[in-house]
Amino acid sequence: MDDPAEEVSIDEFKKLEIRVGVVVEVSRVPRTEKLYKVLVDFGPQGKRQTVTGLVGHYNAEELMNKRVAFLLNLKPARFAGEKSEGMLLDREVPNGARVS
């Protein structure tokens, strides 16, 4: 079992912008085994692209039009040359699993 993470205050938690959006595009990231490039529509907040390791958990068709939770204000990063503008927080995991 993982050790518990450091506790955070409610003010620190409020800094996280977690929103629900709809997946509108999914494609495999070339030359990778586990990565999808996903475009998520957040309505008035616009669309964001992310790179996620969900190959093997979902096929592309299962992700399309799926409503997902997304961490919007994570610092952007690049994976396999693709820009990732947040973190998709959706896949089936066992009880107690750490979301990362």
Image (cartoon, rainbow, N blue to C red):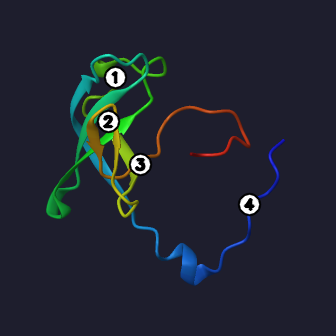
Residue type, label 4 = Ala
For mark 3, what is the residue? 87
Which circle's residue, 2 or 4, is located before the other in the chain?
4
Which circle's residue, 3 or 2, is located before the other in the chain?
2
Camera-near label (1 vs 3) is 3
Label 2 to label 4, Cα distance in Å? 30 Å
Left or right of residue 52: residue 4: right
Vertical placement of 100 versus 58: above or below?
below
Q: Alpha-carbon neighbours of circle 1 within 10 Å: few (<14), some, or many (≥20)?
A: few
Camera-near label (4 vs 1) is 4
Indicate the quadrant where residue 60 lies.
Answer: top left
Camera-near label (3 vs 2) is 3
Label 3 to label 2, Cα distance in Å? 15 Å
Residue 95 image label: none
For mark 4, what is the residue? 5
- For label 1, the SS is helix
- For label 3, the SS is strand
Residue type, label 3 = Met
- In the rendered image, the quadrant that contains the C terminus is top right
For mark 1, what is the residue? 62
Indicate the quadrant where residue 31 lies.
Answer: top left
For mark 2, what is the residue? 66
Q: Are marks 2 and 1 in contact (CB under 8 Å)?
A: yes
On the image, the x and y values in percent for residue 37 come to 28, 32
Q: Are marks 4 and 1 in contact (CB under 8 Å)?
A: no
